[in-house]
Image (spheres, helix red, strand yellow):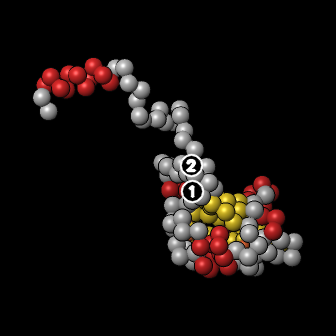
């Protein structure tokens, strides 16, 4: 590029709106079909564990507290998830979905990628009983 042409480009850039976004101050809306973080609706879940068995990345653990009372905690390992949506398609009770607006998944520690879904009391019970989740794949994923 000639020096003169470069100067013209630099001059013009002072009067042109930038094409980049000022993220994180400005945030683009993702399309509705975008596959972001996995979300779980506890109310309908019957604890069949199909999602857990079907997940190719071992990213889901369903921890049963009381199956009759439908008390479960779902532990989601976002750092293992490949966002394939297989679990979403295979859940017959439509408890799972991929949030289109929760796509910011950066974290400083691996533990921050572990998400416990469930009522506050159930999650507290699980953490007190089994301790903090390991970042490594669990040997046993659910309890009866
Ligand atoms: S497949 Fe659906 S109903 Fe079965 S455990 Fe998973 S979320 Fe619950
Ligand atoms: S989207 Fe795919 S990888 Fe992620 S939890 Fe569901 S089945 Fe597993």
Of all residues shown, which one is farthest toward the left?
2
For this rendering, which residue is in front, 47 or 109? 47
Circle 1: is it few (<14), some (14-19), or many (20+) Cα within 10 Å? Answer: some
Instruction: Name the spot of residue 85 as percent of width and height, x first.
Output: 59, 68
Look at 69% across and 66% down and name the residue there: 96
Q: Secondary structure at mark 2?
A: loop
Do the residues under discs 1 and 2 have CB atoms within 8 angstroms?
yes
Q: Quadrant of residue 91?
A: bottom right
> Which image quarter holds the C terminus?
bottom right
**x, y percent for residue 121:** 80, 57
Kindly identify which numbered label has been placed on residue 30. Answer: 2
112 and 92: which is toward the camera? 92
SS for tag 1? Answer: loop
In the rendered image, residue 23, in percent from the top left (x then y), is placed at 49, 36
Q: Quadrant of residue 87?
A: bottom right
Q: Quadrant of residue 115?
A: bottom right
Quote the CA–CA distance across marks 1 and 2.
6 Å
């Amino acid at each position: 590029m000639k020096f003169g042409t470069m100067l013209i480009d630099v001059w013009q850039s002072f009067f042109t709106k930038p094409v980049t976004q000022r993220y994180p101050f400005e945030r683009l809306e993702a399309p509705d079909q975008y596959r972001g973080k996995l979300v779980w609706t506890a109310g309908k879940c019957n604890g069949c564990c199909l999602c857990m068995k079907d997940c190719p990345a071992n990213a889901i653990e369903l921890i049963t507290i009381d199956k009759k009372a439908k008390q479960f905690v779902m532990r989601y390992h976002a750092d293992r998830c490949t966002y394939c949506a297989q679990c979403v398609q295979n859940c017959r009770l439509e408890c799972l979905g991929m949030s289109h607006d929760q796509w910011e998944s950066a974290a400083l520690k691996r533990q921050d990628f572990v998400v416990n879904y469930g009522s506050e009391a159930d999650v507290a019970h699980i953490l007190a009983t089994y301790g903090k989740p390991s970042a490594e794949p669990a040997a046993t994923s659910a309890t009866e």
